[in-house]
Image (spheres, grey):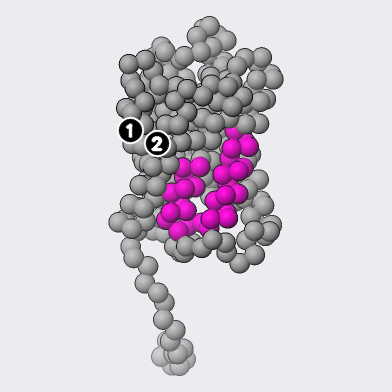
């Protein structure tokens, strides 16, 4: 799809495709948050520690998020683009790949998907969702920078593998690449601030578990990182799109 900025595109607000895409974002975000947050609760049930502080727990959490996001993006990429993340949606909005109305639909669906996932986890496990927090001694500003950098890498990967018009066959591995970068970033940032990279992933568990400490960095950081990646890739990596001029058709003998 070419770069085009718009508040709403023709018939988009009520078009069945918009509804299907919004539903896909809801379901995919639900899948991702249920598995991601559920892995934290499962480890807490096994080890009696909800922090995931050991190396083996960290690897398990990273793997659970990577696999869940791989599945979630795969399930929705052909319907909604497989955002599963308000920061990805924000980056594509600033890049002119979706309209404002479509972005709002996605944000609502993503947040609701996360809330429903956290509610169901609370119901079936009888455990309070863990959510995210900045580890002792790290500080909110360091956590903010971590979220910016990690989300930049995530959204840049999304652009390179799923959005770039010249991605070619690379698009077939987009869900895998997106899942892997999230898993890798969790291995880096998990011990410091949990490595959210996704406001929806942070919001549902925070609301249901009522854990609001440091919550602002899990919104501000990913949105800044997503915006920087979207704008940089859109205007510095993707070639400038030259408008097509209308020409008279060639005579048959000129082909």
Q: Residue 160: horizontal and vertical position, in percent?
A: 38, 49
* Residue occupying the point 47% across, 53% down: 93
Q: Residue 129: horizontal and vertical position, in percent?
A: 58, 20
* Residue occupying the point 58% across, 40% down: 110
Q: Is residue 102 magenta?
A: yes
User: What residue would you read off at disc 1?
Assistant: 145
Q: Is residue 214 left or right of residue 118?
A: left
Q: Residue 193: horizontal and vertical position, in percent?
A: 40, 24
* Residue occupying the point 33% across, 36% down: 149
Q: Is residue 132 magenta?
A: no
Vertical position of residue 193 compared to residue 42: above or below: below
Element class at badge 1: helix
Gap in angstroms between the C-alphas marked 1 and 2:
7 Å
Residue farthest left in this picture:
236
Residue in front for this viewpoint, 5 or 69 = 5
Do callouts 1 and 2 mark residues in contact (Cβ within 8 Å)?
Answer: yes
Snapshot quadrant of residue 190: top left
Residue 121 seen from this side:
yes
Q: Which label was assigned to residue 221?
A: 2
Q: Is residue 205 left or right of residue 247?
A: right
Magenta extent: 86-114
């Amino acid at each position: 799809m070419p770069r085009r900025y718009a508040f709403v595109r023709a018939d988009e607000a009520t078009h069945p495709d918009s509804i299907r895409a919004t539903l896909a974002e809801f379901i995919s975000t639900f899948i991702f948050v249920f598995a991601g947050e559920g892995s934290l609760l499962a480890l807490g049930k096994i080890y009696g520690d909800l922090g995931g502080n050991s190396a083996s727990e960290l690897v398990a959490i990273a793997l659970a998020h990577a696999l869940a996001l791989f599945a979630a993006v795969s399930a929705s990429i052909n319907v909604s683009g497989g955002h599963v993340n308000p920061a990805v949606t924000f980056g594509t909005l600033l890049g002119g790949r979706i309209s404002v109305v479509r972005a709002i639909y996605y944000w609502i669906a993503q947040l609701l998907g996360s809330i429903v996932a956290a509610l169901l986890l609370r119901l079936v496990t009888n455990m309070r969702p863990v959510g995210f927090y900045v580890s002792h001694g790290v500080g909110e500003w360091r956590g903010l920078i971590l979220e910016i950098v990690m989300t930049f890498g995530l959204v840049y990967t999304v652009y390179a593998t799923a959005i770039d018009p010249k991605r070619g066959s690379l698009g077939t591995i987009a869900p895998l690449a997106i899942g892997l970068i999230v898993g890798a970033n969790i291995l880096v940032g998990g011990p410091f601030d949990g490595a959210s990279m996704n406001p929806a992933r942070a919001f549902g568990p925070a609301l249901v578990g009522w854990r609001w400490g440091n919550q602002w960095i899990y919104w501000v950081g990913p949105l800044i990182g997503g915006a920087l990646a979207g704008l940089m890739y859109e205007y510095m990596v993707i070639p400038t799109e030259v408008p097509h001029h209308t020409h008279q058709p060639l005579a048959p003998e000129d082909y």
